[in-house]
Amino acid sequence: MLWLCLYFPRLPAEALGLDDPLAVVTEQRGASRWLITDAAGIAAGTPLATALSLQPQLRAQARHVKAERAALLRLAHWIYRYGSPVHSELREAADVGGIPQALLWVEIAASLRLFGSYAALHAQLCADLEAFPQAASLAVAPTRAAAALFAVAGEPLRIRGDAALQRHLAAVPVARLPWPQAQRQALHGVGLRRLGDLYALPRAAFARRFGAARLRELDQLCGRAPEPAEVIVPPPHFQRRFELAAEVDHVEALLFPLRRLAIELQHWLRARDVGLRELRLVCTHAQRRRSSFTLRFGDAHRDGQRMLAALRERLGREPLSAPVRTLELHADEIAAADVPQGDLFAAADTGGEWTRALERIAARLGETAVWTPAPHADHRPEYAMRRASDVHDAADDARERPLWLLKKPLALPQAPPVTALPERLEGGWWGGADARRDYFAVDWRGARLWVYRDLKTEAWFVHGLWA
């Protein structure tokens, strides 16, 4: 196992959208209230009263744990593209005056070949992080606990192998352990300064003195004990809500939250390895009134900038009906992504440019302003041509076929989730093997299947699948 851990030291402030250098987030337990983010040269962990005496212009805001968890979950969905499994933890401070730790892990051993090298994976990850408002430090180690320990310390180590892990852990000061201060001071008081000193102690004696839980944590650091955790996977559907700080009545002020939503959708599409065909933006106004519009794309893509450009064009076409309080972005239709393969002769992507130009025109003038004539599967001449809503609809009647066809159709215990129109196939009546079937291509339980419904018996069968 090779775990990459990201530590987000400013997540409490970033989850609240605070970018003012004088804004701080505070935690409170009983009568104690202290800073959990840095500001104006004042370190996190400082009591609020002391901080205000040093900088009276500080603006303190209470911590919002729910917002932090939501932000960490969004980051977990993004990092899924770099490997799996993915885990996250919002680790609370052990003492009054401590700082919570927002941690995210992804197992990358199997991904190194995909990216070519750790350097390439690291470069791509850092480039993606620039699109988020979160600051982060990272470390890589064979165990999650060790990777977190070094990431929180700000040591960008990449440790591979048990021997290297043991050497690095032995040199770590005991003061870095996320244990209560009283325990760390007790260890220091008997001359135990580094983790190597703890590992040299008799295990039974250490467990009696400091508890079996602490011994287990030491074992998890070096890989002697398992590290159970809940696995996070991206949700099957994308729906994100953005609460605006105040009502907004002009389009330009919506571009920043829309950019964040588009980037989140881009990362979700990449993690699911799919492309976007249609999105929907829902705006909530005063008295819970809602307005919405839908945008269709000429191909299944996952380009956040392209989504933002289409949203800008559509919003610029007509003024807002009322000031906006919240935004919701939905991915209404997804499909296999049309990701181009490398061209041996580096031909220009004229088709993609043409498709994007049509999208901008449709967003500016309306969906009915751009359409494509397309053949229709009907033998009657007056119905043989139709108006396609987009470029891909024109090819809908050129039905795709699966790579693998089952030797004998496999009966399904229940009807699969069908969202498209069927392809009806009839034949064989002249040879005594009459077949009347409605075929569908469906995504079901993680696989893409070619299924049909027998029109005579109403039973469902799998007839093929795509690799």
Image (cartoon, grey):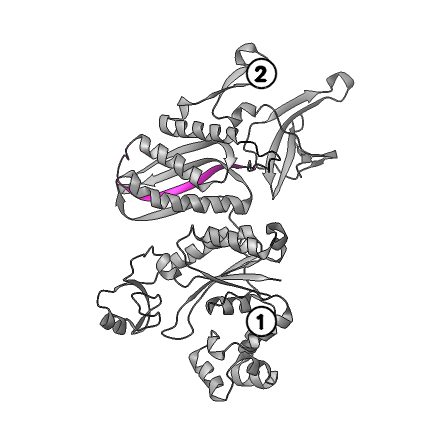
Q: Which residue is found at the position 33% from the left and 54% from the top?
A: 17
- Using the image, determine if residue 304 lies above or below residue 34: above
Q: Residue furthest top?
A: 381
Q: Which residue is found at the position 44% from the left and 60% from the top?
A: 136
- The residues bearing labels 1 and 2 have C-alpha atoms spaced at a distance of 66 Å
Q: Residue furthest bottom?
A: 190
- Per the image, the residue denoted by label 2 is 378
Q: Is residue 253 left or right of residue 188?
A: left
Q: Residue 122: x, y in percent? A: 53, 56
Which residue is nearer to you in this view: 399 or 191?
191
**Mark 1 or 2, nearer chain start:** 1
Eye-nearest disc, 1 or 2? 1
Q: Residue furthest right?
A: 431
Q: Which residue is found at the position 65% from the left and 30% from the top?
A: 452
- State yes or no: discs 1 and 2 in contact (Cβ < 8 Å): no
Residue 98 visible from this viewpoint: yes
Count numbered badges in the picture: 2
Q: Secondary structure at mark 2?
A: loop
- Using the image, determine if residue 338 lies above or below residue 85: above
- Per the image, the residue denoted by label 1 is 220
| Numbered range of the magenta stretch | 319-336
Q: Residue 9: x, y in percent? A: 41, 64
- Using the image, determine if residue 49 lies above or below residue 348: below
Image quadrant where residue 414 sits:
top right
Residue type at the position of mark 2: Asp
Q: Which residue is found at the position 66% from the left and 38% from the top?
A: 412
Q: Is residue 332 magenta?
A: yes
